Image (cartoon, helix red, strand yellow):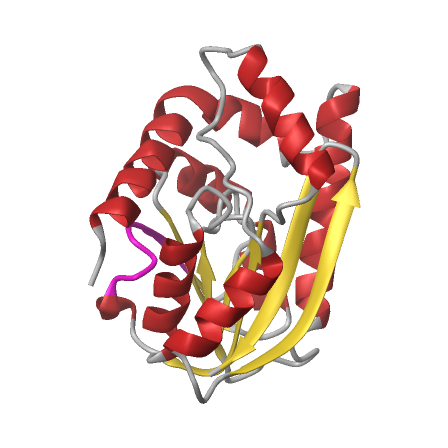
Amino acid sequence: MRTASYTHFRGNLETYFDRTAAKAWEQLTSDAPVSGIRATVRAGRTEMRETLLSWLPADMTGLRLLDAGCGTGAFAVAAAERGAEVVAIDVAGSLVQIARDRAPAGLAIDWRVGDLLDPALGTFDHVVAMDSLIHYPAADIVSVVHHLAARTRGSIVFTFAPQTPLLLAMLGMGRLFPRSNRSPAILPVRDRLLRTRIKTALPTAQIGRDRRVSASFYTSHALEVLP
């Protein structure tokens, strides 16, 4: 069941990416030159994507993967190149269109615009949500993991914004200088609190690997849950 909070934050993301930021994200996720700040974000996202890919089988032939919040599609393409059947979904239709246009022909990727919690998407061997939950509070992150666990045979891997002094300071500076095109707020979450809530919601689940990537203006923490 989707909470009012989840629906609210999901709506913010849809509005931002479809009405404001599609061009900026198209450039950020391309090979085009970007500013110093955006270059650190690009480098951090690349490192995180490689980390999450390393947690998946090298040969994914016959496996079904959900890329939950696929953005412009880099992770979905990499997983499909390993042989996975990928369902790649994002709330922002503009980003999904960029992903479709960029993807090489012949890969088993089902591009979707919609809600990553839609039960009609079916069941999966693995679920990956890279930087798509960083705009949600801890309670909603746990709710998403709980709902996906019922339809996942293998691992759920997601990232969250860790509540560190440096990240809090950077976010605080951003709030002092608001811009009309600023993205929906990143909501830092305490690592220990998140783990405790996941174990409460999924008492039989195991918390697997974790890794934090900090690259100047990019900070994200990956966590693996084995339902």
* Residue for point 68% across, 44% down: 164
Q: Position of residue 154 (x, y in %)?
A: 51, 84
Check if residue 111 falls in the magenta segment: yes
* Residue for point 79% across, 22% down: 36
- Of residues 84 and 101, the one nearer the viewer is 84
Q: Position of residue 11 (x, y in %)?
A: 28, 37
Q: Position of residue 47 (x, y in %)?
A: 76, 51
Asked if residue 121 lies left or right of residue 167, the reply is left
Q: How many numbered circles does the render carry?
A: 0
Looking at this rendering, what residue extends furthest in the bottom direction?
204
When the figure is inspected, residue 3 is found, relative to residue 120, above or below; the finding is above
Residue 43 visible, this angle? yes
When the figure is inspected, residue 205 is found, relative to residue 112, above or below; the finding is below
When the figure is inspected, residue 169 is found, relative to residue 227, above or below; the finding is above
- Of residues 43 and 61, the one nearer the viewer is 43
* Residue for point 24% across, 69% down: 119
Q: Quadrant of residue 19?
A: top left
Check if residue 163 falls in the magenta segment: no
Asked if residue 72 lies left or right of residue 137, the reply is right
Residue 47 visible, this angle? no
* Residue for point 29% across, 68% down: 121
Q: Position of residue 42 (x, y in %)?
A: 71, 37
When the figure is inspected, residue 128 is found, relative to residue 21, above or below; the finding is below
Picture quarter with the N terminus: bottom left
Residue bounds of the magenta highlight:
110-118
- Of residues 85 and 200, the one nearer the viewer is 200
